[in-house]
C-alpha cells in the first residue's frame, strides 16, 4: 500500500504556480480538507466540496487547469478512502513536529496547515455530522457519551496543532506553559491514533444512517 499520494507533486506545482498560488490554499491544507471530506459520515458530492479549496475570491484561470485540478483532487479523495478502508490512517511523513514548534507561525508549519484544513472541512460538514449524530442518538443513546468524548478529544487535538502559538499562550495563562512545551512531543505521538479514532467514529455513525455504504466513484472518462 502506497501511503504517499502519487500525484502530490502535480498538486504542489499547481498550488505554487503564479496563476494559482493566491487562489488556492496550500497543499497541506488541501490534504487536510480532503481527509475531512473522506472521513465524513456521508461524503458530499464533488460540486459541494470542491469550491472549498479556494481562498476568498479565488478562481481558476481556464477550464483545462480546472479539469486537471479536479482530476488530481478526486484522485486524492480516492487515495484517502483506500487508506481508510485498509486501516492505513496516519500522518504523512512531512507532517512533523519540529523543535520549538510553538514559536512557529501556523502558515509556516505544514502540520498546522494540515490540521487547519481538517478543521475547515469538519466545520463545513457540521450538518452532515449532526444529522448522523441525531440518528445515533435516536437509535442508541447509550453510545452517545463515549462518542461525544471521542469527537471532543479529536477536535481538541486538531485545534491544538492547528495553532500551536495560541495553544502555548493559553497554557501560559493557566501557568502551565513549561509543562505544555515539555509534553508537546508526547501529545504529538497521540495525534495519529486520534485520526483513526475520528475515522472510526464516522464509521460508527454511518451504521445509523439508512442505506449508507461507499458508493462514490469518480466519473468515467
Image (cartoon, rainbow, N blue to C red):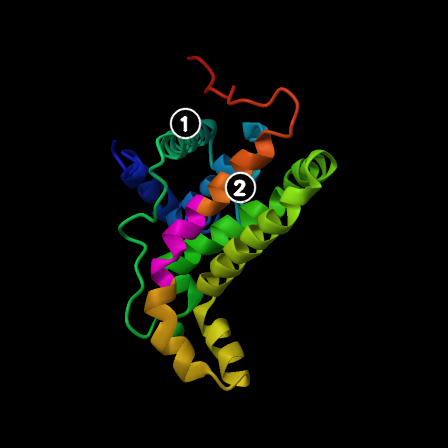
Residue under numbered circle 2 = 201
Residue 29 placement (x, y as % from top left): 44, 50
Magenta span covers which residues?
A: 188-196
Look at 42% across and 44% down and name the residue there: 196
Q: CA distance from mark 2 to mark 1?
A: 29 Å
Residue 199 placement (x, y as % from top left): 48, 41
Q: How many marks?
A: 2
Q: Quadrant of the C terminus?
A: top left
Q: Quadrant of the N terminus?
A: top left
Q: Mostly what secondary structure, the magenta segment? A: helix
Look at 28% across and 72% down and name the residue there: 99
Residue 155 placement (x, y as % from top left): 54, 55
Q: Residue furthest right?
A: 138
Would you say 9 lies left or right of 73 here? left
Q: Nearer the viewer, mark 2 or mark 1?
A: 2
Closer to us: 181 or 57 = 181
Residue 145 placement (x, y as % from top left): 64, 51
Quarter occupied by residue 184: bottom left
Closer to us: 153 or 15 = 153
Look at 71% across and 33% down and name the residue there: 139
Amino acid at each position: 500500500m502506497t501511503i504517499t499520494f502519487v500525484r502530490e507533486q502535480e498538486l504542489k506545482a499547481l498550488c505554487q504556480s503564479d496563476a494559482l498560488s493566491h487562489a488556492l490554499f496550500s497543499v497541506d491544507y488541501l490534504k487536510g480538507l480532503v481527509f475531512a471530506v473522506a472521513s465524513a459520515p456521508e461524503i458530499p458530492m464533488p460540486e459541494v466540496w470542491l469550491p472549498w479549496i479556494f481562498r476568498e475570491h479565488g478562481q481558476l484561470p481556464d477550464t483545462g487547469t480546472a479539469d486537471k485540478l479536479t482530476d488530481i483532487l478526486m484522485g486524492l479523495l480516492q487515495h484517502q478512502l483506500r487508506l481508510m478502508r485498509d486501516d492505513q490512517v496516519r500522518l504523512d511523513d512531512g507532517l512533523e513536529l519540529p523543535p520549538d514548534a510553538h514559536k512557529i507561525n501556523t502558515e509556516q508549519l505544514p502540520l498546522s496547515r494540515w490540521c487547519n484544513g481538517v478543521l475547515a472541512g469538519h466545520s463545513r460538514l457540521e450538518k452532515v455530522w449532526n444529522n448522523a449524530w441525531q440518528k445515533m442518538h435516536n437509535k442508541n443513546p447509550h453510545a452517545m457519551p463515549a462518542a461525544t468524548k471521542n469527537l471532543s478529544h479529536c477536535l481538541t487535538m486538531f485545534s491544538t496543532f492547528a495553532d500551536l502559538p495560541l495553544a502555548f499562550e493559553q497554557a501560559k495563562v493557566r501557568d502551565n506553559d513549561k509543562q505544555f512545551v515539555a509534553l508537546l512531543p508526547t501529545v504529538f505521538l497521540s495525534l495519529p491514533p486520534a485520526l483513526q479514532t475520528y475515522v472510526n467514529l464516522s464509521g460508527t455513525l454511518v451504521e445509523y444512517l439508512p442505506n449508507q455504504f461507499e458508493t462514490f466513484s469518480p466519473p468515467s472518462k
